[in-house]
Image (tube, helix red, strand yellow):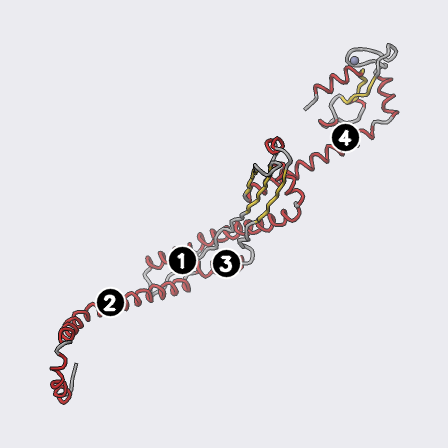
Amino acid sequence: MLIPVGLEIEVVPFHPQLVVTDDVAITDVTTLPGLLPVLILVLAGVLIAGVWIGVIVHRRRVVAKASTALVRLSGLNSTYASQVVTLPPIHLHFADAVSSKAKFDRYDLTALMLRSVLEQEHSIQAEIGARNAATNHYVEYQREVQQLVVSSLGRSLHPHVSAERFEKIEARLFKRRQMSFPTPTANIRSTVRYTSPQGRNSYSGTLNWDFDELRRGLAAARMERDRQSTAQYLRQRERSLMTPKVRSDILRRDGYRCQMCGATSREGAQLHIDHILPVSHGGTTTPNNLQALCQPCNLGKSNRFVG
Ligand SMILES: [Zn+2]
């Protein structure tokens, strides 16, 4: 510090009054110069780090602009941005309550789940569809990204960055700048409760489904419903085809005789027209699939087809 001579002279008369604080004055004088190198080092460090970060950021910018792969990737990203969207989880909760512990014990939570999702199949299907669309778009996106990897990645250069460094930075940025997979998620819960009469005991059972279980569960529930309605439709159609004329034709053809035991209607046997291959198994109401059977044989036969 440069202190004017005149000022220095002025300080001297005050010195005796500063005796008490002399120690402080001395230590201050000795530690400040001791701290200075540290401060300078810290400042220099910050400065170097700043410059270094600046260099890295600048290099990235240079690479990002000069890299055909990165420029095309950013184009792909903006093309797919509105399609590859991670939608929020599907949340659903179905609850049921039963009136006895026995009912609680044999309660089928999967059945509750299947029934409940089927009741809301259209809205659930729409939610699933939106998420499936996003993942399908992601697959398309990834296909195009892979094409970029083959056609453009590692093929660009810039005079200010060494080829090796350019390639490294480009590869890292290319990986980091890809859109992430729009993982579909769901939290579907079914709960059954039973509370004993005085409310002394309370039981609850829970079944949770994730997105994949929901997707598969809804598909299975729909397929089962369709199968049942198809079977019902077929039964009704085959039943309607069994006209009095078909009946009498088959009885006449079979000589009014049970085709299994030979009992005849003349002997008092009550003859039925039987589907050889049951309608429930795909059998049709056509003469080659029909036969006359007496009641005991017919019952015995249908027993064999139980299940
Ligand atoms: Zn018979």
Q: Residue at image x 53%, y 48%? A: 185
Label 2 neighbour load within 10 Å: few <14, some 14-19, many 20+:
few
Q: Name the residue carrying label 1.
A: 173
For discs 1 and 2, the disc positioned in front in the rendered view: 2
Q: Name the residue carrying label 3.
A: 77
- Between 89 and 266, the one lying in front of the other is 89
Q: Amino acid at mark 2?
A: Val
Q: Residue furthest front?
A: 198
Q: Which mark is residue 68?
A: none
Q: Amino acid at mark 4?
A: Arg
Q: Is residue 7 above or below residue 289?
A: below
Element on which disc 1 rests:
helix
Q: Amino acid at mark 1?
A: Leu
Q: Is residue 117 above or below residue 250?
A: below
Q: Amino acid at mark 3?
A: Asn
Tell me the CA gap for discs 4 and 1: 64 Å
Q: Which mark is residue 235?
A: 4
Q: Residue at image x 53%, y 59%? A: 79
Q: Name the residue carrying label 2.
A: 42
Q: Residue at image x 14%, y 88%? A: 10
Which of marks 2 and 1 precedes in the sequence? 2
Label 4 neighbour load within 10 Å: few <14, some 14-19, many 20+:
some
Name the quarter where the C terminus is drawn: top right
Q: Position of residue 193 (x, y in %)?
A: 60, 39
Tell me the CA gap for discs 2 and 3: 42 Å
